[in-house]
Image: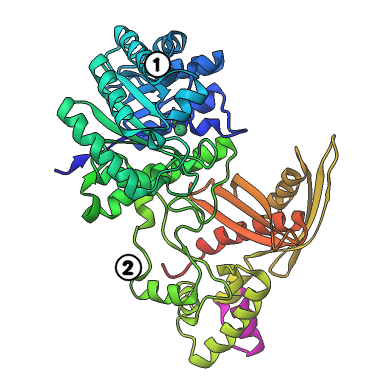
Amino acid sequence: MSRKIWVFDTTLRDGEQVPGAKLNLYEKLEVAHQLKKLKVDIIEAGFPASSEGDFNAVKEIAKQVGNTNDITITALARAVKADIDAVYHSVKHAENPLIHMVLGTSDIHVEKKFSKSKSQILDIGVEAVKYAKTLLPDIQYSTEDASRSDFEYLWSTIEAVVKAGATMINVPDTVGFAEPEQFGELIYKLNDRLKNLDDSVLLSVHCHNDLGMATANTLAAVKNGADKVECTINGIGERAGNAALEEVVMAINTRSDVFNVHTDIDAKEIMNTSRIVSSLMGLEVQVNKAITGDNAFAHSSGIHQDGLLKSRDAYEIIRPEDVGLDDMELVLTARSGRHAVKDALRKLGFSQLNEEQFESIFTEFIALADKKKEVYNHDLYVIVKNYFATNNIESVDVNNYADSFYELIDLQVISNTTFPSASVRMKKGTEEINSSAVGTGPIDALYTAILKVVDTDIKLLEYKISSVSRGKEALGKVKVIAEFNGVTYNANATDTDVIKASALAYVNVVNKIVVENLLPVK
Ligand code: KIV
Ligand code: ZN
């Protein structure tokens, strides 16, 4: 069996330090429950001395999430009695409570931040551990700014606090200054001495991402003996954030040939956790973010799509299902090649097209993709229908299918403080349908008006609008759940008008649902 790496999640403490990301008690509990599902070993639930709200949140997490033996709940204290007391009184309700305390070891911290001597700081740390040890058996000591500390002083501190009773030593790269090779060496040397001193003490790392190396530094530490990694979901945290849990875990899983270790994380819960954290904290995940970004499993280049359709391992190192996604996404854009378009048409039931027919349809596809950016299956149906109509090709199916889609003809939205309202003119096949609605805001009114026209019961889960092309165009993104089958669908649309981009994204998602439920070939 390979060596186990403990996963300590600090989304609710370091992650919550992101400006504007503060959560209320119920939101914190929701994240903590999800982290338990993800099977992290330790949750750092907050900094209880900072406010009564944080104290209560940590206490409730300890009671409601820490109520089983498979998880440890901790919270942060400075090396002062009042902070340690606050941590103790909030985490003590958990089955496995842990006190985490932090005190700097670099010259900058000792001399400039505390204006004290090294031996004074070391004594403060030792006394704090001794005090904490009277309250709980498990104590983690963090040597803040360890990566910029004098090695022998860092080691003297670790040796002294372990002798005083610390059971976990955390080595933070507080300012993201470390470099993987150097950091790996530091961990190797510390681990060697620590395991000789007391091999039951866990050696942990906590890396920040100021130079974009948090994950690399964490993994270098793992290679060099670290037993535990501190991470956050989506890599959120102070300044440029912390090592992202999903990146560290999936690197360990995917490159077991290099790391030869394992974690207990249930990787299938990664996407769920990422989405919950992102939506509750209001922190969007960068689209190209490794593992949890929207595009992490979306392939748009024609060369790649062709390769993937021949053999998935040509361009895929992680199966999307392994992190809780449905499947890889082949986005049809102007860059998609013939192979991807042919495959999409085949899945829609058009596998009998001859070369000449396909080439004409492909030309239309490219023209539309140039205008629309992303082409959906319902767009392909319409292209095929138009092609069949102009060439007098009989196909009852394609006419019926293409007549099932909705098209936005016009819209009007009024935004005001009393009754935001919207009216839409839409088309289904040849039939024109008008509708209007009021809502809690202009988008709510707009989506309610569209929903009145379409024959599908859907609930909006996510809506985003952002600018693209240096602000000239808006990108609308929606994610919905279809109530009749519980499946989630998402779609995008761009337009120079933000309201129209929002409406088109919603119509795209409705059509996506319609297509999936028409699909003749699976
Ligand atoms: O970055 C840091 O040093 C910390 C400590 C509290 C571990 O967040
Ligand atoms: Zn930190």
Q: Position of residue 439 (x, y in %)?
A: 76, 40
Residue at x-position 31% and y-position 26%: 71
Looking at the picture, tell me which residue is in the foreground, 257 or 441. Answer: 257
Could you tell whether 31 is left or right of 388 in the image?
Answer: left
Range drawn in magenta: 382-396
Q: Is residue 3 magenta?
A: no
User: What residue is shown with label 2?
Assistant: 313
First in residue order: circle 1 vs circle 2: 1
Say which residue label 1 marks. 63
353 up-or-down from 317: above or below: below
Q: CA distance from mark 1 to mark 2?
A: 45 Å
Give 493 or 124, whichever is nearer the viewer. 124
Q: Position of residue 410 (x, y in %)?
A: 80, 61
Residue shown at 84% from the left, 35% from the top: 417
Q: Residue at x 30, y 27 (%)?
A: 169
- Amino acid type of the residue that numbered disc 2 sits on in the rendered structure: Asp
Q: Is residue 394 visible?
A: no
Nearer the observer, 147 or 348 = 147
In terms of depth relative to the viewer, which is nearer, 458 or 314? 314
The coloring applied to the image is rainbow
Q: Does residue 244 show up?
A: yes
Q: Is residue 122 left or right of residue 299?
A: left
At label 1, which amino acid type do we have? Lys
Q: Image check: 140 left or right of 87?
A: left
What quarter of the picture does the N terminus occupy?
Answer: top left
